[in-house]
């Protein structure tokens, strides 16, 4: 089942009752001039089990501990935003799978050659998907990228990921002089930052649900990063976010600021269609298939990660 992504960008009271998320609006609750029947009708309820991601994007949101407990028990990713309304924090459950200790052991005992082979597969999938976006939406020559994807060695020792990235970003937004992918860079970097934050939460949630340690990466290593493995596994999924951002950019909508309209469109990332294992699937479901295949690679049951492709 596709889990729902909920965005809260206004003041709200969030609580739980009968295994449902209860949403109340402060301006309604505090208004003594409104009839009680109107207040009751303004309350919304959603089953906790249907929720996959919750984004809290307002300082006047109140959330009860009981609701947080229920969301985490449901393996819901809870994202909090900062004063600039960009994703800042991510909360996930400590235990998300009944065989977690076994999965941890397989992951911790995985050999360096295996991790290098998994990173090779990851980079190949990423460059292949980048080439599709560039060739389809920009009609740019991508034979070089397709060749680089084939030439990636174990551990990407030649850093073909970096070479492909330089070519990719130089041609993705040709109307912007010397565009660079930079968190603090000019738009549409703001859209990319927001989209990648959503994607990262989806991947981290799936890793925890699979029983893997999101901290221990196959390539990324940073003592201050709690989600190195999520940053690894999300790489082949990034071009799907890029494609959505590119379409928003080409629509001539104002992207100088992250408007509610733009956020709403980016919050569709979990339900975007991708192709994985020969079948069309919502991105959130595909990510779970990817993390499940990764766990089997660590246990020796498989040798290849299942990654998505474009149709």
Image (cartoon, helix red, strand yellow):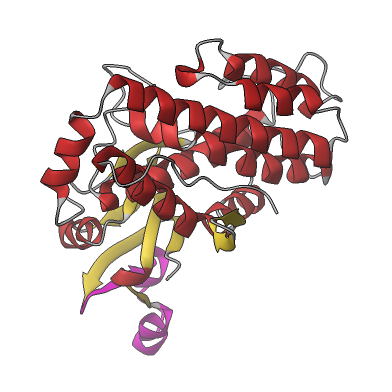
Look at 57% across and 37% down and name the residue there.
238
Quadrant of image for the N terminus? bottom left
Q: Nearer the viewer, residue 222 or 136?
A: 136
In magenta stretch: residue 214: no
Look at 40% across and 54% down and name the residue there.
288
The vertical placement of 268 against 156, above or below, is below
The vertical placement of 1 against 107, above or below, is below
Total numbered labels placed on residues in the image: 0
Q: Residue furthest top?
A: 158
Q: Nearer the viewer, residue 261 or 230?
A: 230
For the record, the magenta segment spans: 18-42
Residue 69, percent from left and from top: 17, 58
Residue 243, percent from left and from top: 70, 43
Residue 206, percent from left and from top: 35, 50
Q: Is residue 62 left or right of residue 244?
A: left
Q: Nearer the viewer, residue 109 or 38?
A: 109
């Amino acid at each position: 089942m596709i889990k729902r992504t909920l965005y809260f960008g206004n003041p709200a009271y969030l609580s739980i009752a009968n295994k449902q998320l209860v949403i109340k609006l402060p301006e309604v609750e505090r208004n003594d001039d409104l009839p009680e029947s109107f207040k009751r009708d303004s309350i919304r309820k959603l089953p906790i089990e249907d929720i996959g991601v919750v984004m809290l994007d307002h300082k006047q949101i109140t959330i009860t501990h009981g609701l947080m407990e229920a969301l985490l028990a449901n393996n819901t990713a809870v994202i909090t935003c900062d004063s600039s309304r960009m994703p800042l924090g991510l909360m996930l459950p400590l235990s998300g799978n009944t065989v977690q200790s076994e999965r941890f052991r397989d992951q911790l005992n995985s050999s360096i050659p295996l991790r290098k082979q998994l990173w090779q597969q990851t980079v190949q999938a990423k460059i292949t998907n980048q080439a599709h976006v560039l060739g389809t939406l920009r009609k740019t020559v991508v034979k070089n990228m397709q060749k680089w994807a084939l030439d990636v060695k174990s551990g990407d020792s030649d850093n073909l990921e970096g070479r492909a990235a330089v070519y990719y970003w130089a041609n993705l937004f040709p109307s912007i002089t010397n565009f660079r992918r930079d968190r603090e860079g000019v738009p549409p970097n703001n859209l990319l930052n927001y989209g990648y934050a959503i994607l990262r939460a989806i991947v981290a949630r799936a890793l925890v649900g699979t029983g893997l340690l999101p901290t221990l990466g196959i390539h990324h290593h940073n003592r201050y990063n709690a989600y190195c493995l999520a940053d690894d596994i999300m790489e082949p999924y990034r071009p799907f976010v890029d494609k959505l951002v590119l379409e928003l950019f080409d629509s001539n909508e104002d992207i100088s600021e992250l408007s509610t309209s733009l956020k709403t469109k980016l919050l569709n990332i979990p339900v975007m269609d991708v192709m994985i294992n020969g079948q069309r699937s919502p991105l959130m479901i595909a990510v779970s298939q990817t993390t499940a295949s990764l766990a089997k690679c660590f246990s020796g049951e498989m040798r290849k990660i299942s990654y998505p492709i474009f149709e």
